[in-house]
Amino acid sequence: MPFSQDEGYVPVDISAIMDAIRGYVNTQFGTTYTSEQFVGTNFYKYFYALAQRIAENETKTAEIFLKLQEYIDFTNERISRPVATNPGIIEKLETEDWIASVKPMIEADAGKINICVDVDDSDPDYEDFKLAINTIIKDSTAAGCVTQGTETSAIVLSNGQSFDFKFHLPDRKTTLLRLTTVLSENNQLVIGDPDTTKATLLANIAARYRLGKNFEPQRYFGVTDAPWAATTLLEYSINAGADWSSAVYDANFDDLFECSLADVTLVES
């Protein structure tokens, strides 16, 4: 598996694996198969499922090294980052189980900070939650920085003065998902159960997506999740199925895509 300073360990794709196998076959059996000729041989059919497994393991190994690198980078940043920075505020809220995002600073927002927190405002204890969140924001923002939002709490400071601290609620977008998988002609594996496939998709989204992040369909499901498939395509709709897209959704800091098992349609071909 090749390694680069910029991208880390890069998994070898199936095409490269099959080319290597073709070279071994030619050496072992005295054949002279080209890439095009090798595709039609029994050798190709026999070794393709093995190549799929090798490619899957290569991808998983690369993901392990990526997660390790991310952990090291995160630890180094956390050591050097005070809580009053935007990432620090997000982390402080997360320690109290509140998922948050912060609007990137622009010139027009100088002196202001926009924080969005994923909290259920219909909960009977919401007023207590709101005060707890705004208290964390009060303790985590720099003096002179004015908080913005619709959810306000008046909090008395140590000098006796009362100030309003605020945050935004998410712009929740009910999201329909349509996952299309095309069966590989070379497949020799058991095709996945539809409910299991849907559950895997939602688990991937839960692990890789969060409030305020761009929604990136290509990151949430691929052939490594469905080794019986030649290709996969994940599309989403945020207008009840009137329009579908597989493009990256450029999110605002308060956008939150929400979907459940009932919102997932699986198309197999």
Image (cartoon, helix red, strand yellow):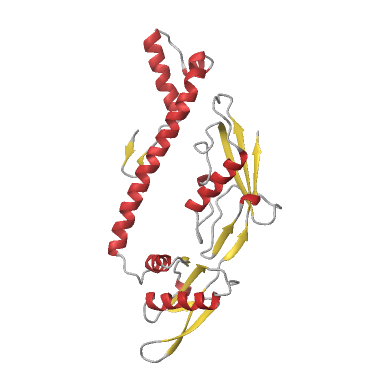
User: What residue occupies the far right of the structure in this picture?
Assistant: 242
Q: Could one spot residue 175 in this view of the protein?
A: yes
At horizontal 39% and vertical 17% (from top left) the residue drawn is 23
Q: Nearer the viewer, residue 239 or 175?
A: 175
Q: Position of residue 89 (x, y in %)?
A: 40, 69
Q: Position of residue 173 (x, y in %)?
A: 61, 60
Relative height, residue 84 to residue 212 (above, below): below
- The quadrant the C terminus occupies is top right
Side of 207 where 5 appears, left or right: left
At horizontal 37% and vertical 81% (from top left) the residue drawn is 143
- The quadrant the N terminus occupies is top left
Q: Position of residue 107 (x, y in %)?
A: 45, 72
The quarter of the picture where residue 94 lies is bottom left
The quarter of the picture where residue 113 lies is bottom left
At horizontal 40% and vertical 12% (from top left) the residue drawn is 26
Side of 199 where 10 appears, left or right: left
At horizontal 61% and vertical 53% (from top left) the residue drawn is 260
User: What residue occupies the far top of the structure in this picture?
Assistant: 30
Q: Position of residue 237 (x, y in %)?
A: 65, 52
User: What residue occupies the far bottom of the structure in this picture?
Assistant: 160
Relative height, residue 162 to residue 204 (above, below): below
Q: Could one spot residue 111 in this view of the protein?
A: no
Query: How many badges with numbers are in the image?
Result: 0
The quarter of the picture where residue 126 lies is bottom right
